Amino acid sequence: MKTVSLHDITELVGGTLAGCESDATQLSICGVNTLACADGKEISFLANKRYRDVLATTEAAAVLIAEDEPNPSQVCAIRVKDPYLAFAMLQRLFHPEKVASGYRHLSAVIDSSAVLAADVDVAANAVIGEQVTIGQGSRVGAGCIIGDRVSIGKRCLLHAKSVVADDCVLGNEVYLQSGAVVGSDGFGYAWSGERHLKIPQSGRVILEDDVEIGANTCIDRGAIGDTVIERGVKLDNQIQVAHNVRIGAYTVMASQVGVSGSTIIGKGCQFGGQVGLAGHLNIGDGVKLAAQTGVMTDLDPGGTYAGSPAMPHRLFFKVSALLLKLPEIWKAQRSR
């Protein structure tokens, strides 16, 4: 079990100790836990003020708190600018990622033309196609399928049964959760008068560095040109991204978002669960969309929207309040 002194933890997170006895700095910490469950060998954190009451009863050895929080009476505190960020840093410390070692399972099928760095891991029943390149430190999980001419960068992780179709490009430190599909055909058809004629989808999907794709999320290849997911984008589980979409850097999307074809999404956007966007839209940088927002028109940068059709969130609150009064208004109108 990995242990780290409280002193070293404080240094790592750039914090300041408060309310501790002098010898507490050498206390050995073996992990991070919630305020309610932490014991005397674990550290906890207060990132949401609704859990402030639990702080008074926690048995944690120390607690990460914001710089403006009052000192807890019974536990050592580490003051930091962002307790949640500090928590994330400690989780990475106590739960480091596995390092690739060059393991290749005998059941894996790797085409002779594929070029894999010496330390790339390939698990059981994975299939790697022709002219694939995979960079140093990457890991390919059990049952993954990597099509022909795919390029995968350094320190990528493809969890079990994820798929990267032909010609797609993954940058460095890209993560695909189980069941993710990158490069599926876009939903493109033309009506001939008798049948829907399938349009070949000849583009690619490009995932830039530090992108994570959630479980069972599907990203369609471009019909002509590419679907592009820019640096640092994080997509939750069960999201659909259609052909020729571009998602700007550091945008995050919660589960079950659907993005229709050729929509351009700006940098640093935040989308709640089940948001839906029509096709060929332009969504500005920094836009925030509440859960289940339906977007049918372009949105200016920096706005916060809710409802379907999408409207500024303050207006949405007013409309929602009015909806609750409609039965009363209708009853009054009928009684006239």
Image: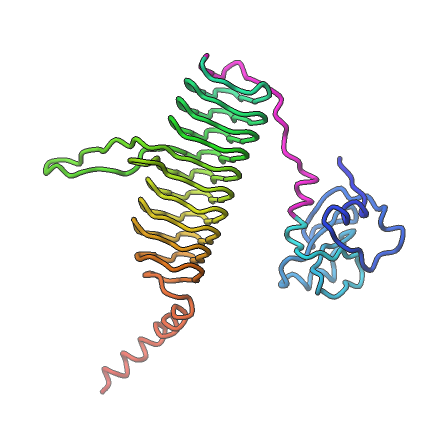
Q: In terms of image quadrants, where is residue 117?
A: top right
Between residue 65 and residue 270, name the one nearer to us: 270
Q: Is residue 205 left or right of residue 249?
A: left
The residue lying at 39 percent from left, 53 percent from top is 275
Q: Is residue 159 left or right of residue 246?
A: right
Residue span colored magenta: 88-112
Q: Residue furthest top?
A: 112
Residue 260 screen position, x and y as percent: 32, 46
Q: Residue furthest bottom?
A: 336
Looking at the rendered image, the quarter that the C terminus falls into is: bottom left
The residue lying at 29 percent from left, 36 percent from top is 223
Q: In terms of image quadrants, where is residue 127?
A: top left
Picture layout, residue 253 above or below residue 149: below
Residue 19 screen position, x and y as percent: 82, 60
Residue 166 screen position, x and y as percent: 38, 26
The colouring scheme, among rainbow, by chain, secondary structure or one colour, is rainbow
Q: Which SS does the magenta portion mostly show?
A: loop
The residue lying at 42 percent from left, 29 percent from top is 164
Q: In terms of image quadrants, where is residue 183?
A: top left
Q: Residue furthest left?
A: 193
Residue 18 screen position, x and y as percent: 81, 59
The residue lying at 72 percent from left, 55 percent from top is 64
Between residue 47 and residue 73, name the one nearer to us: 47
Does the magenta portion include 60? no
Q: Is residue 193 left or right of residue 11?
A: left
Does the magenta portion include 100? yes
